[in-house]
Image (tube, coloured by chain):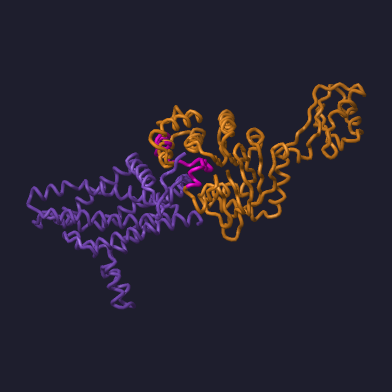
Chain colours: A orange, B purple
Amino acid sequence: MIELENLTKDFGPHRAVDSLNFSVAKGEVLGFLGPNGAGKSTTMRMLTGFIAPSFGTARICGFDIQAAPVAAKSHIGYLPEGAPAWPDMSAEAFLKFAAAARGLSKAEIKPQLARAVEATNLGKVLRQPIGSLSKGFKRRVGLAQALLHDPDVLIMDEPTDGLDPNQKHEVRDLIRAMAGDKAIVISTHILEEVEAVCSRAVVIAAGKIVADETPQELEARSHRHNGVWVTLSADADQAKSVLAALPDVAGVEAEPGGSRLFCRSTDKRSIAGAVAAALREHGLSFEEMHVERGRLDDVFRAITRHDADETPGQSAMARETEGALR
Amino acid sequence: MSAHATPHRLGLSFGAVGTIFKREMATYFATPLAYVFIVVFLVLAGSFTFYLGNFFDRGQADLISFFQFHPWLYVVLIPAISMRLWAEEINSGTIELLMTLPITTADAVLGKYLAAWAFTGVSLALTFPLWITINYLGSPDNGAVLAGYIGSFFMAGGYLALGSFISALTRNQVIAFVIATAVCFILTAAGSPLVTAAFSSWAGDGVVAFVRSMSFMNNFQDIMRGVLDLRDVVYFASLILFFLFCTVAAVNRFKGA
């Protein structure tokens, strides 16, 4: 439903987004990740027709965003970064305006509005001016605006930014509930969010794709993947030497002052069975043991820092250009 | 899921223009802006007419002493309306919301412009007690008065279109106001020696005559006496269209197109 074709954006001499090619199918929830200034917002702004690409293009439900912008935009629900809205309007007037601008008929507006308000839990504040609402409610007004017309494509720039943990949970539930019949793209730097709602993660750095896989595959890139955590009842030192001697264990780290050990696995092989057997053989009892899937944070740092180090000036500049546009 | 009817060749959809128009109009009256503007406009228009225009001393049942100050009133007051048209949207980020709706730039430019123009029209219409006064005091040529009102309305439209363009060039409303006021002043005074002198020293008579003909004042002078010349109407109409076109270009430039 979303197809990017060599999508590129230059700001002056700086290439903020560099030839992105990927597509998002119905039913997918794509998490769009990357450090600040990597080009996430710029890409989303091109997809939604807010800024024009320098080269390449994107198609939404088959409509080219440059050749048929109105048709393409009518299939999109978009939550821009920071959820901008006119502060003098009441939430209700704002949503009615958005519905009318989306071409919903008078008969459609009422039920659609009611549905969006219910999904985002806005009932209490409908009559209040948006300028007087808290950050969380303001964000939900933006969300309601994006969902109002039941779009085929939903694009959200940091949908949970600034929400409290309960609100984050609600928004994630909402995204999961809608996932079936839409193509959804969310940008975020909260990695737990990717695990929680996304079926696919695309990581970009300095405008280029550096990873495009499922969150689980991304986790598996971690050097800690398939390592084993063990919490021993007693005598961590003996256990440490026993485990370090195992063939598939590359190394054992002890948590400072604790009885908790982490065994790194050689070539990410599965070592849980061997670790358990070795401990039992030496009569060492343990309270807890679990397999590390890998930390998304580590992977994220490993694959994006490389690029950032290479061109520190560039990413600083990307931030500036994005700031200037805002 | 239905979109507006396919926009026609100009990239305009009447439904979308109407939706933008209604939102803008509601915003004027949801804030003190509308009321402050209308009160200041009426007070200034009234005091100019009576004190500077010697409305009573002239002993004429017409509104020339009222209309003759309109260009100068508009120079200051119209930029106060036009400054927020685009600069505010750019600065607050709502332009991103507006431009990602399934509407064209032309829809948004026209909808916002028409709302601002209709709003100034409301302010102008609220000066009707003056019209009642002259009808009570004498028997004026009401056709001439109507021509004056129409001319004044079109002139306001010209200033607004110019202000809309300048507002789309900046995110700062104060800059939009100051520059629009300066440009409106120059355009208004283009027929006066103040501006023509700057040209006459180096340019030929033809250029000076052209500059003078571009003046709002010159084109309004006849209208306020009740002579609605087609040339003046064409002048203001083409000025409005030209600057609206420029506004669309400025907004699109901002989008990087």
User: At x 71% / y 44%, what residue is drawn?
Assistant: A301
Q: Nearer the viewer, residue A196 or B62?
A: A196
Q: Quadrant of residue A27?
A: top right
Q: Is residue B102 left or right of residue A267?
A: left
Find residue B168 and report its horizontal and vertical position in percent: 42, 54
User: At x 28% / y 63%, what residue is drawn?
Assistant: B235
Find residue A323 and report its horizontal and vertical position in percent: 54, 50
- Give the magenta part as a residue range: A71-95
Find residue B135 and report its horizontal and vertical position in percent: 10, 49
Q: Quadrant of residue A105?
A: top left
Q: Nearer the viewer, residue A289 or A117?
A: A117
Q: Is residue A93 above or below residue A47?
A: above
User: At x 57% / y 60%, what residue is drawn?
Assistant: A12
Q: Quadrant of residue B175?
A: bottom left
Q: For residue A256: magenta? A: no
Q: Is residue B236 left or right of residue A185?
A: left
Find residue A295 and report its horizontal and vertical position in percent: 73, 37
Q: Nearer the viewer, residue A241 or A137?
A: A137
Farthest residue, direction left: B138
